[in-house]
């Protein structure tokens, strides 16, 4: 195990950067302050693109990035996606070691290695387990879905850090933490970064840690780099686990695509666009990938009988520039 962890750290360390910024915020309508923040970011493209959490960079100037083996670089904020809480930075550099992502190696009970910058100390690492997947958490009045729950302790400075699975490839990006001493789910990046960077050093998180899974990180980063915004499909439902197969419709938005197609609360969606729906996470991902308005067929169960409907997937854009 020790040899495996050491190999994972050595292989992935050059893909994790230390980010230092000064974030502008308003404690009230009359005052604007700046706050020093240290956090982590992950190289997603060899030509200088990195992905991190938006809270420490969206309103920051200047932003500096330190990549192992490289000089300290000034980073440009490219764009952010408020839905996922991710942001992309750009530095003038070539031949960086981009992280290799694994979308399948996140099974609960499997090992997880965290690479970040605890308390601003570059090259920190920790070991734990995947504790769950498909979690929905509320962070700063924003609901984040399909999150990974990991049992790796984190410290201020590790927001935006890399979670690596037993395959040696990246499976997620650290986003938020839950503290039993706080009021529900804390805001992750700013709440616990702030505790470590100002005044007392703060303590490592002893609660649950949540990470954005690899496939969402890749999709959001790619679309932010390409378009400066993220286009997502939308069908106008809130879904939960079904009693068996598929996922149950818990809420139908008025005049949304699902309602217009005849779906109701309590229906269980078992197929989307000809593909079997394994659960909520599966349906959410299928819809999220859509980038243009189109009609798809869905099969669903209602009172034990199977029905089929055609709905028109709509697209929403999150512009974080």
Image (spheres, rainbow, N blue to C red):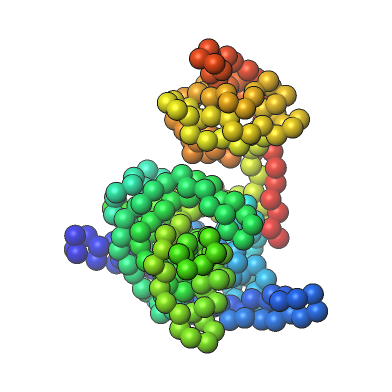
163 shown above or below 57: above
Q: Is residue 277 left or right of residue 69?
A: right
55 shown above or below 284: below
Query: In the picture, residue 114 is in which quadrant?
Result: bottom left
Q: Residue at x 59, y 33 (%)?
A: 250
Q: Is residue 273 left or right of residue 70?
A: right
223 shown above or below 204: above
Q: Residue furthest top?
A: 305
Q: Residue at x 46, y 65 (%)?
A: 179
Q: Name the image quarter holding the C terminus.
A: bottom right
* Frontmost residue, 194 versus 293: 194
Q: At which x and y percent is residue 56?
A: 59, 70
Q: Residue furthest right?
A: 30
Q: Is residue 244 left or right of residue 319?
A: left
Q: At which x and y percent is residue 234?
A: 65, 37
Q: Residue at x 25, y 62 (%)?
A: 5
């Amino acid at each position: 195990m020790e040899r495996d962890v050491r190999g994972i750290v050595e292989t992935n360390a050059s893909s994790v950067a230390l980010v230092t910024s000064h974030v502008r915020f308003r404690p009230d309508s009359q005052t604007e302050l700046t706050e020093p923040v240290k956090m982590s970011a992950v190289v997603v493209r060899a030509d200088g693109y990195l992905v991190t959490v938006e809270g420490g960079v969206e309103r920051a100037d200047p932003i500096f990035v330190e990549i192992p083996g490289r000089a300290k670089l000034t980073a440009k904020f490219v764009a952010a996606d408020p839905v996922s809480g991710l942001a992309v930075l750009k530095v003038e550099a070539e031949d960086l070691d981009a992280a290799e992502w694994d979308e399948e190696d996140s099974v609960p009970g499997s090992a997880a290695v965290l690479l970040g910058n605890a308390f601003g100390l570059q090259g920190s690492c920790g070991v734990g387990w995947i504790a769950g997947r498909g979690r929905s958490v509320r962070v700063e009045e924003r609901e984040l879905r399909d999150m990974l729950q990991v049992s790796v302790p984190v410290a201020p400075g590790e927001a935006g850090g890399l979670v690596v699975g037993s395959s040696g490839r990246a499976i997620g990006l650290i986003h938020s933490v839950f503290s039993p001493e706080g009021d529900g789910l804390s805001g992750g990046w700013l709440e616990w970064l702030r505790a470590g960077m100002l005044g007392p050093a703060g303590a490592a998180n002893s609660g649950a840690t949540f990470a954005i899974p690899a496939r969402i990180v890749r999709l959001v980063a790619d679309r932010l780099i390409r378009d400066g915004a993220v286009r997502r499909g939308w069908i106008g439902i809130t879904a939960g686990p079904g009693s068996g197969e598929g996922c149950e419709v818990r809420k139908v938005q008025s005049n949304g695509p699902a309602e217009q197609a005849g779906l109701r609360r309590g229906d269980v969606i078992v197929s989307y666009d000809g593909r079997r729906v394994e659960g909520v996470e599966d349906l959410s991902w299928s819809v999220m990938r859509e980038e243009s308005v189109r009609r798809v067929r869905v099969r669903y169960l209602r009172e034990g009988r199977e029905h089929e409907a055609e709905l028109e997937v709509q697209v929403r854009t999150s512009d974080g520039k």
